[in-house]
Amino acid sequence: MSATVIAAIAVILVAVVLGTMVTGIFNKLVVYRNRYKNAFAQIEVQLKRRHDLMQETLRLAPLIEQLDVRTGLPLLDIALPALRGLTGAQYQRFKQNISQLVQADDAIDLFEWSLHRILLHELQTHHSNVPPTRVRHHAIASLQPQCELLLSILAHAGQRDTAAAAKAFEQGRRRLNLPQGRLRRAAGNGLAALDDALDTLEEAAPRIKRQILQAAVACITADDMVTATEAELLRAISASLGCPMPPLLLT
């Protein structure tokens, strides 16, 4: 075989290899271009959905502001079945949005805390494979700090002065038979500490949980009145303990 033929064959082989490489590169570029276009299309869809959601939220906001504060819990109960129908991805986005809204002003009031606690507890139980809470506490005595904090927050939430708060706290303390229980100062009752306390109380035996809930009811009804804030707090506590909320008449 002459050198010319060999050279020609070599050129052809190189051309074939280069052609294959160019074709592969081109195909990859087409794939990347399609992915790029699809990604931007998805972003556009999500932005439109967010815009529509924002517009609907802005439309409803003035109407919601006109509602009586006592309608908060009934509206939440109406919304929960639909929220339980969210997909896993929708639930994660919803949870993130709720957290951002609650923390938007760098301050969390009792209503925001209660709403956040109720929603996340109810929906997390439905959407996540959370194993049953292990029972670690079989006596109230081992939960005295948590019960003290819980009753103190309830007492201060429903009363305007220290004397009335002390009376409300005493009603709850008696239900729990905590002879050493002491009302804590309102300024020292942080909601982050209440989160931790409820996480611990959730590990109590069912009998203890019912007793704690009865004490909470005794505390907020000490003045024969139940405010919307007290009812929202009780609902959050009930959800956290996994106990049905006792029927209450708001005043």
Image: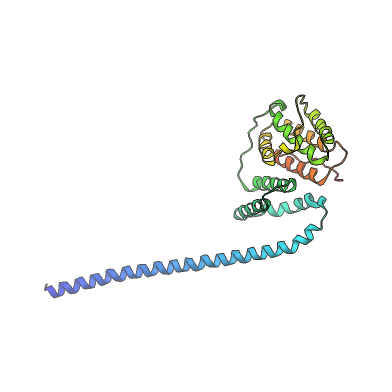
| Residue 50 in sight here | yes
Vertical order, 229 against 197 (above or below): below
- x then y, percent, for residue 44: 57, 67
How many marks the image carries: the answer is 0
Task: Identify the residue shown where x is 83% and y is 38%.
Answer: 161
**Side (left or right) of 19 relative to 60:** left
Task: Identify the residue shown where x is 72% and y is 51%.
Answer: 80
Q: Which colour scheme is used?
A: rainbow
Choose between 152 and 6: the one closer to the eye.
152
**Side (left or right) of 2 relative to 137:** left
Vertical order, 83 against 52 (above or below): above
Task: Identify the residue shown where x is 65% and y is 51%.
Answer: 99
Instruction: Assign the N terminus to one quadrant of the image.
Output: bottom left
- x then y, percent, for residue 64: 78, 58
**Side (left or right) of 202 relative to 163:** left
Displayed quadrant of residue 141: top right
- x then y, percent, for residue 189: 72, 38
Displayed quadrant of residue 249: top right
**Residue placed farthest to the top in the image?**
179
| Residue 206 in sight here | no
- x then y, percent, for residue 177: 78, 26
Vertical order, 235 against 83 (above or below): above
Instruction: Assign the C terminus to one quadrant of the image.
Output: top right
**Residue placed farthest to the left in the image?**
2
